[in-house]
Each structure stands twice: as C-alpha cells, then as structure tokens.
Amino acid sequence: MPRSARNGFSLIEFLVVVAIIAVVIGLTLPAIRRVREPAARMKCMNNLKQLMLAMHNYADAGSPVARPSTGHPNAPAGHTFPPGCFGPGATPEERLSWTVALLPYLEQERLFKQFDVEKGYAGNLPAAQTQLKVFLCPEPKEATTGDAVTHYVALAGIGYDAAGQPAGTTGNGFMGYDRRTEFATIKDGTANTIALMETRSGLGPWARGGAANVRGFDPADVPLHGDHRPFGGHIGGMNVAMADGFVRFISARIEPKKLAAAITIAGGEPVDLD
C-alpha cells in the first residue's frame, strides 16, 4: 500500500525557517537605517534652508506684508530679521512666535491670514494648532503624530536668560524676544554666526513665543547632543543654519567653547565648527 504524501512542515523545519527570516531581518534593518538616516538629515537641512530663505526675504522686504508689531515702539523697522515674539501678552509664551511672521514667505499666506496679530497665542489657537512639516525634522516621532511643534530654535546667545537681554548686551545671539537683528548688527559676520539649530528637548508649539522657539546656550550644559540635551537631531550630530543661509551638519563632539563662539553675533572670537 503506497505511503500518503506528507503535508506541512515539521517542527524542526519551521524553526529553521523562522531562524532564517530572523537573520534576514537582522541583516536588512541596519541597511534600511543607513538609508533612512541620511534621507532624514537631508530633509531636515532643506527645512532649515527654507526657514533661512524666509528670514532673508522677510528682511529684504523692508516693510513685509502685515509686518507684526513687537509692542515696543522704539524697535527698529525695515531690513531686520523678525523678533523672537510679538503681539500682546505679559510673557513670551502668551505671545506669537517669529515663525508666524515668516508664514507669508513659506508659501503659507492663507494660514497667516487666519492669525489676528493683535491677539496673543491663546487667541489664535485654531490656526496655531496646524502642523507644518517645515518646522519638523522627519526623524523623530513628532513628525508623524500631528503635533504642531517645532524642532528648530533660534539662538539667543550665551546664558539661559539671553533671549530677554536688550540689544548690545555682550554674548547676544541672532535673536531675542524683543530684539530685531540687522545685518550690520552681526559683526562677527553672517557666515560665522549660527541662527537656527535643531533640538529634541523642550519642544513646544511652533506658533507660541518663548523657549520652544528662542533659547540661550550655556557652554557648561554638557553633553550637548541628545534627546534630553540642549541640541540634537541625528546620529552623531545636528544640523545648524548660519545667518547667511548656509546649512551644515556639525558633530555632537564639538567643543562647547567653539559652539559658543559661533552663537554670539559680536564676540570677535575665531569660529571653527569642524
């Protein structure tokens, strides 16, 4: 009597197949990560380039469309970068961020028109809760959750209180809460001054003023790079945008003093980000 044909796998054969699949996955995942990480880094760099182009277009316009008031009548006008926040409010967090002022230069004029610049952040929540990809690095989870946060901060200078310092203060950086920086103010040169950096800590709404968008730097706060550190973004380092619009990647191992020298706008220090 002929034997019946055997159907299915034996336990040993099944385990062998599972092991092979596990090995293939183990070999494939690092390759996928090696492809995804450079792509995310390039997208992030492109975001920063767009933001700096908008910054320069804002400044070049002289009197941009619907230019918001800082609430300070003595603030200079024309051919300046936007202040860190504007509009009514007793604290920076109650006001609107510099990112709102850039919207017309980021092809977001329709969204900009939804903001009432005479109101603060709380009075503009429907528009402020719109997620914009240009403010998000594609690598972290916030890029997929729909949260209207930003990974990009403007550098206020040296010290955690730098954003609130008046113009002319030693150690000032590219942007303060109520400072309008002119090209001539950046005495170290726009090519030697960091305007924007990416971060993974202290994230907050892109449209709300305060430390979520503008922050100072303490060289003693090390390590510099990581999810809960001052700056961070990618494996081995982070993207930065110089005030002239050039975007580059700097190592997580950069010396804090070198980074501080590139953050100040009129320190007179030699700048070396390599």
Image (cartoon, rainbow, N blue to C red):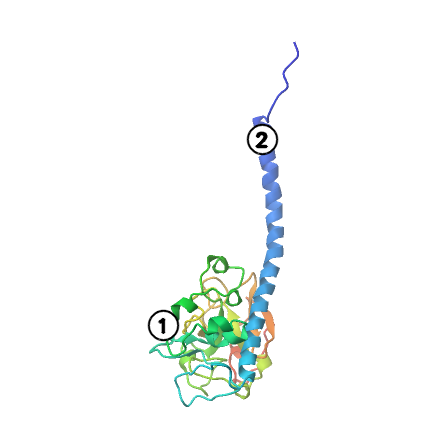
Determine whether, in the image, residue 29 is placed left or right of residue 63. right
Pointer 2 local density, CA inside 10 Å: few below 14, some 14–19, many at least 20 = few
Closer-to-camera residue (179/170): 179
Q: Looking at the picture, how far across and down is residue 170, in whole percent?
A: 46, 85
Q: Looking at the picture, how far across and down is residue 71, in whole percent?
A: 39, 84
In whole angstroms, how far apart are the C-alphas of marks 2 and 1?
A: 61 Å
Q: Amino acid at mark 1?
A: Gly
Pointer 1 local density, CA inside 10 Å: few below 14, some 14–19, many at least 20 = some
Query: Among all residues in the image, which is located at the extreme left?
Result: 90
Closer-to-camera residue (214/106): 106
Q: Quadrant of the N terminus?
A: top right
Determine whether, in the image, residue 213 is placed left or right of residue 58. left
Q: Looking at the picture, how far across and down is residue 9, in whole percent?
A: 59, 27
Residue depth check, mark 2 versus mark 1: number of the one nearer the observer = 1
Q: Which residue is denoted by mark 2 in the rendering?
A: 14
Mark 2 and mark 1 lie on one chain; the one further toward the N terminus is 2
Q: Is residue 59 visible?
A: yes
